[in-house]
Image (spheres, rainbow, N blue to C red):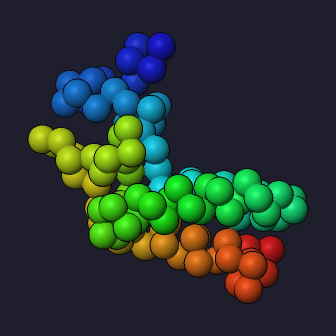
Amino acid sequence: TATKDCHWQLRLIGRTQYHGTMEWSFLAALEIACYRAIGNEPEATMREGTLRELMSRYEGLYEVYEHDVPVNKRFYKSENNFSWALGLLIASRPATSSILR
């Protein structure tokens, strides 16, 4: 299980989901780029729409989400306007997709 395999420091502060169930925005942006790269524009558009909904709801693109809410815990707070994710999202757009090739 994720809890058993999690590093002891993360278990100590209650962050067993850190690399298991949390949703990372930069990975979502890469996923969108991959769907575009294989020619699955409908899936890329749908997933980009979901990410844009989160951006609109929370006024920026956060680093990591848990159940579609930016993580805001005692020992960990998700960074807003996370540059990795924003840059990858821009690079995944058809006009700029050559950046990823």
Kindly indicate the quadrant of the structure image that contains residue 66: top left
Question: In the image, is 32 to the left or to the right of 58?
Answer: right
Looking at the picture, tell me which residue is in the foreground, 42 or 97. Answer: 42
Q: In this view, does 19 lie above or below 95?
A: above
Q: In the visual, does 34 lie left or right of 10?
A: right
Q: Is residue 97 visible?
A: yes
Quarter of the image holding residue 5? top left
Residue sitting nearer the eye, 85 or 2: 85
Residue 101 place in picture, x, y as percent: 80, 74
Residue depicted at 73% across the width and 86% down the height: 95
Relative depth, front residue between 74 and 61: 61
x and y percentages locating residue 20 in the rendered image: 46, 31
Q: In this view, does 29 lie above or below 64?
A: below
Front residue (pair 101, 34):
34
Residue located farthest toward the right when viewing the structure as drawn: 39
Residue occupying image coordinates x 38% and y 38%: 67
> x and y percent of residue 39 in the render?
87, 62
Q: In this picture, is 60 found above or below 76?
A: below
In screen coordinates, is 90 left or right of 66? right
Left/right placement of residue 98 relative to residue 18 reads right
Residue 75 percent coordinates (x, y): 16, 42
